[in-house]
Image (cartoon, coloured by chain):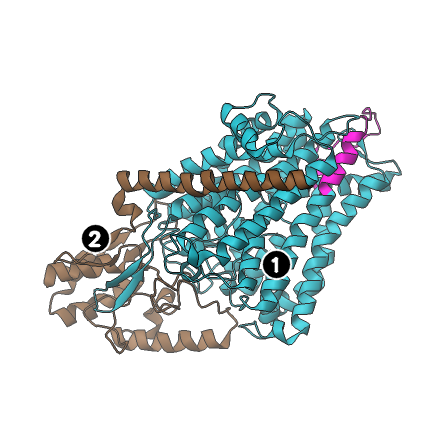
Amino acid sequence: MTRQLLASVRALLLATVVLGLAYPLLLTGLAQVAVPGRADGSLVSSADGTVVGSSLLGQGFVDSSGDPLPQYFQSRPSAGDWDGAASGGSNLGPSSPELAEAVGSRRAEVASFNGVPESQVPDDAVTTSASGLDPDISPAYAAIQVDRVAAARGVSADEVSALVAQATHGRDLGFIGAPGVDVLDLNLALDRAFG
Amino acid sequence: MTGWLQVAVLVLALGLVHRPLGDWMARVYTSGEHWRVERLTYRLVGVDADAEQRWPTYLRSILAFSLVGVLLLYSLQRLQALLPLDNGMASVEPSSAWNTAVSFVTNTNWQGYAGESTMGHLVQMAGLAVQNFVSAAVGLAVLVALVRGFVRRGTDRLGNAWVDITRSVVRLLLPLAVLATVVLVLGGVVQNLRSGGDVTTLAGGSQFIPGGPVASQEAIKELGTNGGGFYNANSAHPFEGPTAWVSLFQVFLMLVIPFSLPRTFGRMVGDRKQGLAILGVMGLLAGISLALISSFQAGALPEGQEVRFGGPLSSLFAASTTLTSTGAINTQHDSLTPLGGMVTLFNMMLGEVAPGGVGSGLYGMLVLAVVAVFVAGLMVGRTPEYLGKKLGRREMTLASLYILTTPAIVLIGTAVAIAVPAGQAGMLNSGPHGLSEVLYAFTSAGNNNGSAFAGLSANTPFYNTALGLAMVLGRFVPIVLVVALAGKLAAQGKVPVTSGTLPTHRPLFAGLLTAVVLVVVGLTYFPVLALGPLAEGLS
């Protein structure tokens, strides 16, 4: 057994150097040279060039007291308050009374904020995502926000809809996953177009 | 409709790859030649690569390798704050470090901790990802030993564990992981050494943007059916699973080796139809499971689900991650419908054999095949035999202990946890769903899966210790039994095929094996499933 243990120690030290250091570091170098933007997290900047987030990570478009800002499209609710240091979901099961209550009150809020009947509020608008950082909303949720954003910015709904269309992605390759609208990209485009 | 197209493309890709990959793996484990880099490895490690081992030595090599792995990984976490690239994280506290060390060495990758707030880049790369490679290699080594047991005659030698582990890494896992990393990086998975930092968001708030060498770890995490996420949200995190096609590619990665191994098995035993029969059983069970979970999840509220993945891909991922022993997630399993969640539980309860973990899935299925042959033998009153080996009292004792081990761990563990206050304190949901959370945790740990109904607050001394124990026993008791079985089988001669031999490459046997898998599991777990997810789903 001693011989096997000594061999194990040497084998694991070797594995640590090769698989634990050389492998990830060489690939990091390669990624940083080939596609630095993607390897660093697809960061995006506002018009003045400051980084405002990642096109892959959802963020909250709310004021300091947590109320939604009407001039921005709103993300889905987040179980972790869009904190990049605490990703995760609510873990509430469908039979949870807490979840039912949260969904009900969110539906009422979203409906009144956007001036639409509750029946038009899609499910992704009232549920938290798996990561707490979902960058997307469904096209249906974007659609019910268009009039409110247009009114808050004093522009026509058609102009806003055109930007929504640009920020919308279909299913990957036409059949993988689901369509969505990247909210940060969309809001950046709004700021660029209308100041 | 597009949901099933995703499945069709996945099945097509697996179908195309499983032949060349399966044949390649057979060559890896039967070739008499050492590559130069492997010779260098054997010299540095100090082992004689040409000396074949008896089963006790083969087993000791694997156990020693795993034991040292646990100690090394535990030390790395405990010393984290003193080492470079710690990203300012504190050293991990003892019960969590023990749980995590055991978790990664046993190929479970249960995570009681949240990656982005616990593990610095050094521990992720040099600790956790190393075990992602070598724990998968250990699974392959044990499988190869068992297959050699069926192939060889009248010998006490099973091969050399060091050679099997080294070749698994050098010729299989590392090259595939490099390829997969390139694809993942192109797909947007991050790969950097940033420690992360705050940015001012568009609305004037502040958001922490994490960094990390994620793609290189993600690649082996799926390929090695490990499943431990770099971040807490695992493959649902946009930096791990940025787009839907990347998520589908990850499903492919976790299935590709387990579904190719039956081909390897067929090659090695010299009858590809034997491999095809096993593949058929795995495919059938996986297909049924996917159909069930997809129908139970249809129209469910997208709580715990990402918009870009949508319902069907989330169900496909949930099924694949629990059918293999991966345990990565792209949707929160705790928020699945009661019956959808029950399917993921049931997938793990099958013993992770359809297709199961890398190596471990097939050795589990082969033990069940032994049991199936025995059952058939009882029906006709003949001494059962499989692949030319007689299954006598000693062989059947080992196989029976194997199928009893995991259920005992799961059920006793769950019973203890819901009986003691420290266990009850961890449940987030109440009633049957609370029981499901605890049952899921012990099922996941005992079967070395690692996914969770994450509402359970498992990062407590009680759960860290108890689940750590469940993972150790759930991994190594079966390994001891399998290697011992391999030794007994190799020592036998070969029984000639007669008209009374049960053909084990026909649909009849595949059907029998499927039935044995389902009946053994169903009878063992039905009572507790009735109290948990079934009670919740029907109420």
Output the letter for the chain in brown. A
Q: Nearer the viewer, mark 1 or mark 2?
A: 1
Q: Vertical placement of B422 versus B407: above or below? A: below
* Residue denoted by label 1: B468
Q: Residues within 10 Å of mark 1 (few under 14, many from 20)?
A: many
Chain ID, mark 2: A
Q: Please give the name of the residue rendered at 37% of the width and 41% of the height, measured from the top-left corner.
A: A25
Image x and y of residue B538, in percent: 61, 69
Q: Please give the name of the residue rendered at 42% of the width and 50% of the height, measured from the top-left corner.
A: B122
Image x and y of residue B395, in percent: 80, 40
Output the letter for the chain in cyan. B
Q: Is residue A130 left or right of residue B416?
A: left
* Secondary structure state at the residue bearing disc 2: helix
| Label ID, residue B44 | none
Q: Inspect the image, locate mark 2, and give the three-letter code of the amino acid beneath it.
A: Gln
Any part of residue B386 in sight = no
Q: Does the magenta-highlighted stretch encompass residue B487?
A: yes
Q: Which quadrant of the figure has residue A4?
A: top right
| Magenta segment boundaries in residue numbering | B482-511
Image x and y of residue B107, in percent: 57, 48
In front here: B176 or A173? Answer: B176
Chain ID, mark 1: B
* Secondary structure state at the residue bearing disc 1: helix
Image x and y of residue B522, in percent: 70, 55
Q: Please give the name of the residue rendered at 52% of the width and 43% of the height, measured from the top-left corner.
A: B224
Q: Vertical placement of B125 versus A189: above or below? A: above
